[in-house]
Image (cartoon, helix red, strand yellow):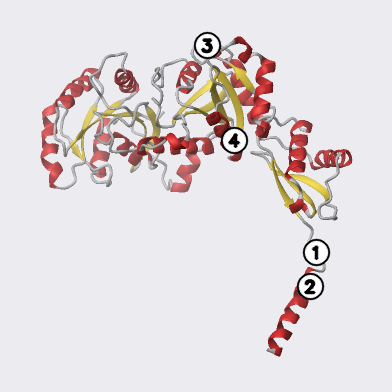
Amino acid sequence: MLPSIAIVGRPNVGKSTLFNRLVGQRVALVDDTPGVTRDRREGEGKLGDLKFRVFDTAGFEEAGAESLAGRMRAQTESAIKDADAILFLVDARAGLLPDDKVFAQVVRKSGKPAVVIANKSEGKAGAAGALEAYALGLGEPVNISAEHGEGLSELYDALVALLPEKEEKADEGDEDGEENAASEKPADTIRVAVVGRPNAGKSTLINKLIGEDRLVTGPEPGITRDSIEVKFEYGGRKFEMLDTAGMRKRAKVQEKLEKLSVGDTLRAIRFAEVVVLLLDATMPFEEQDLRIADLVMREGRGLVIGMNKRDLAAPEMTMGKTLREEADHWLPQAKGMPIIAMSGMHGDNLDKLMKAVVETYEVWNKRVSTSTINRFLERALSQNPPPAVSGARIKLRYMTQAKARPPTFVLFGTRTDALPESYMRYLVNGVREAFEMPGVPIRFSFREPENPFRKKMLKKDARGKRKKKNRK
C-alpha cells in the first residue's frame, strides 16, 4: 500500500499548485483567490522514483465549528489524521504570519512526521521569508517553487527521509504511457458524476453513500468548487463517484472562479460513464435542469435522475406515475430514463438509485446482434415507410450496431441525408423500446452505396471543362 502525505497550510500558500505538480496533472483548481480549495482531494503522486498518495486540503483558518471555514478545517484535520506524513506549506514571499505559527502547533500535536515547505521561494523576494520558516520549530525548511518546479530534488530528499519504511519505488522504465495505463480505472468499476444546480444535495448524497462526512456540506449554495473523486463499494459493485460544482445559468456565471468550477464539472461529465442528475423535488424540472440533462445526452453518457429532498416536496410530485410522465414530457431525448424519488440526507431509496446506475451502465454498454437489428428495421419500415422527398423515395436497406458506450447504429440506404427529423425520432424511439435502452443516448450514422456512374460523370465533366478552356 502506498504511503500517504497531506499538504496543509493557511489559504493561498500554493497547496493545490504543489498537488498538481506531484500528481502530474492540473486536476485541482488554482487561482489567486484565497480559499479556492474546500474539499479534500486525493491523487497518486510521483516524484523521481517515489510513489505515494497525496491529499490536497483546504487552508487552515480560525473559525467556529459550525461555520463554512470551520467545516473546511475539519476536513483538513481529517486528512492529517489519515496521512502518514505532512507537508506544511508557508508562503516565503509573505513571510511567517501568526496563523502559520498557530497551525504549526496543530501539525506538531498530530504527532505525524512533518516537513516545512517554503513555497514561492524563487528569487530574492522569497529568500528572507524562507529563513523565517525555521521559527516554526519543525526542522529545516525546504525551499521550492511549486509553480515553476524549482527545488523538487530537495523535496525528494526530504520525502525519502520522511518515509523510510513506507518508501515505494516506481517500476523501472515506467514511461508516461505506462503510468497513464496504471491510473486507469479497473474494468469492473463504474465512473459516476453527480451533477445539478447549486444546493441540490450532491455532496450530502455522496457522504450518505460512503457513510462518512468526506465532503463539505451545508445550507450555503455553491460550497463545492472542485470535482472531487470518491472511490467506494456499494452493493458489491465498485464506483468512482465525482462530486461536482453546481451549474447555474450561463448568464449568471460572471466570476472567474465560478467559470473554472463549471469547466471542471463539464470535464467530470465527459470523464463519467453514467451521470446522476439531482433535481430539487421542491423545484423540479427547472430550465437549467433540462439544459444539464441535454448536455449529458449530447456528451453520450447514461442518465439517471434523482429527485432529491422528496421529504420536503408535495406528495404528488414523488409518485412514480407522475414522475414518469413529467420526465418523459420534459426530456423526450432521454425517454424512459430511470427517475428515483429519494433523500440524500435521510438515505431514502439510495439502493434504488444505485441499482438504476448499474442498470443504466449495462444498457450503455449493450450490444445487439445484426440479425436482430435488421428484423427490427424490417418491422419498422413495414409499419411506417420513409416518406418520399421531392418525388423520390428514400430506401433504407440495412442496419448494424457500430459500437456501444453509447449505442451507435449505422444505417445503409439511399438519400439518407433527406430523412426528416420526425422519422429519425421514430427510429430512435423504436430502437429504445425494442432493445430496452432507456436513459442512454442512441446515435445514428448513415452510409450510402457508391454510385457506379459517379466516375463516368466526373470524367465527363472534366472533359467538358477542358473543351471550354480550349475554346477560350
The residue at which mark 3 appears reads as: 312
Residue at 33% from the left image edge and 41% from the top image edge: 21
Q: Is residue 442 above or below residue 323?
A: below
Q: Which mark is residue 209?
A: none
Q: Measure how far apart labels 3 and 2 are at the Cα level.
A: 69 Å
Residue at 59% from the left image edge and 20% from the top image edge: 353
Q: Nearer the viewer, residue 407 or 54?
A: 407
The residue at which mark 4 appears reads as: 294
The residue at which mark 2 appears reads as: 457
Q: Nearer the viewer, residue 113 or 170?
A: 113
Tag 1 and tag 2, C-beta contact below 8 Å: yes
Residue at 15% from the left image edge and 34% from the top image edge: 140
- On screen, residue 438 versus residue 262, left or right, reads right
- Local SS, label 1: loop
Q: Provide residue 290's location: percent of width, then percent of height.
A: 58, 31
Tag 1 and tag 4, C-beta contact below 8 Å: no
Q: Measure how far apart labels 4 and 2 are at the Cα level.
A: 44 Å
Q: Quadrant of the N terminus?
A: top left
The residue at which mark 1 appears reads as: 451
Mark 3 or mark 1, which is nearer the start of the sequence? 3
Amino acid type indicated by mark 1: Asn
